[in-house]
Amino acid sequence: MLEVKSLERSYEEVKALKGVSFKVENGIIFGLLGPNGAGKTTTFKIVSTLLNPDNGEVFWEGKNIFENKKWWKKKMGYVPQELAIYNELTGLENCILMAELYGLSGSDAKKKSVYLLERIGLKDKVNHKVKTYSGGMKRRLNLIMGLIHNPEVILLDEPTAGIDVQTKVKIYDFIKDLVKEGKTILYTTHMLKEAEELFDIVGIIDNGVLKAIGSVDKLIEEYAPSVLLELRLKNMEKHIDFLSSLGEFNGETGFLKLNVPSQSDIAGIIEKLNSKGIIIENMVIKGASLETVFLNLTGRELRD
């Protein structure tokens, strides 16, 4: 089990992490989901020991990773969001270099590198220089370089950022296979669909605080309403206060978003609007989803 306890980290005046704690059982995919700048990468850099926390501890199988860094680096593989590859080398040369850094011998390093390159779909590109690779190919190469030493725990920091759908599917399948082999995966993303597709357990982080943790179904049950109702209204100018009391109302566009306990309550909302002469131009009903959970916990405002 990986156990993260009360991590705190500041960058000058900005407190990036404010006591983040969670546990990850072996052999699952645990995902940190959050907006850009929420604290996901900082958490991963600490767990990988690239950063030291101001406060807090991290344990793997009961051992403090900061007191056993050399041991932990053999157990853990880290795939950063930024590509950590050499464009003037071939894909095979990149992998062999990384394998040798982890202590694999020349023949073993090549054998393992060729195996992983073929497995990730780069068989025809092993001897091509990386500068000729597409963005998706580079992402796949970056991924396997982080696990060339066969780690037990793999940290993936937004490994599908900026790539095409086909490459995403290939990477998803590869990651699922790793879990079947007993690997423990920690994964960061800000993409809700990715979280729903992959994660066994989701942690939602925002402004350096872990807001909630659990399976997707559990989070929906606890934090999402049964129904999200979105309405576009006319003839509502005299009823701004009333509409604002119902939910999230934009007087300029005439859009009203509100949470209702169940679909059976929608008729009552429509009756209230009709009684005031408010016209419903369009209505969209959305069931409970991870998107609703995410917005309820992190807010709806865009943040840089």
Image: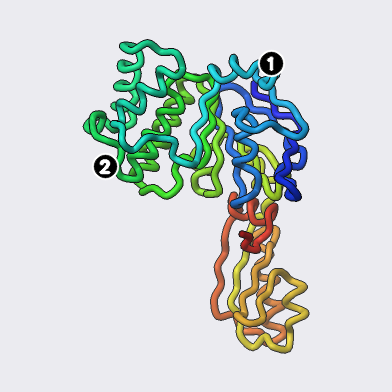
* Residue 63, disc: 1
Residue at the image point whose x is 30% and y is 44% from the top: 134
Residue at the image point whose x is 55% and y is 80% from the top: 281
Of residues 108 and 21, the one nearer the viewer is 108
As helix, strand or loop, the secondary structure at mark 1 comes to strand
Q: Residues within 10 Å of mark 2 (few under 14, many from 20)?
A: few
Residue 12 percent location from the top left of the image: 73, 47
Q: Quadrant of residue 121?
A: top left
The disc labelled 1 sits on which kind of residue?
A: Lys
Residue 158 percent location from the top left of the image: 50, 42
The residue tagged 2 is 132
Residue 100 percent location from the top left of the image: 40, 17
Residue 18 lies, with reference to residue 251, above or below; the image says: above
Residue 60 lies, with reference to residue 138, above or below; the image says: above
Residue 108 percent location from the top left of the image: 34, 12
Of residues 278 and 237, the one nearer the viewer is 237
Q: Quadrant of the C terminus?
A: bottom right
Q: Are marks 1 and 2 in contact (CB under 8 Å)?
A: no
Confirm whether residue 211 shows in the render.
no
Task: Decide which of tag 1 and tag 2 comes sooner along the chain.
Answer: 1
The disc labelled 2 sits on which kind of residue?
A: Thr
Q: Residues within 10 Å of mark 1 (few under 14, many from 20)?
A: some
Classify residue 252 as left or right of residue 129.
Answer: right
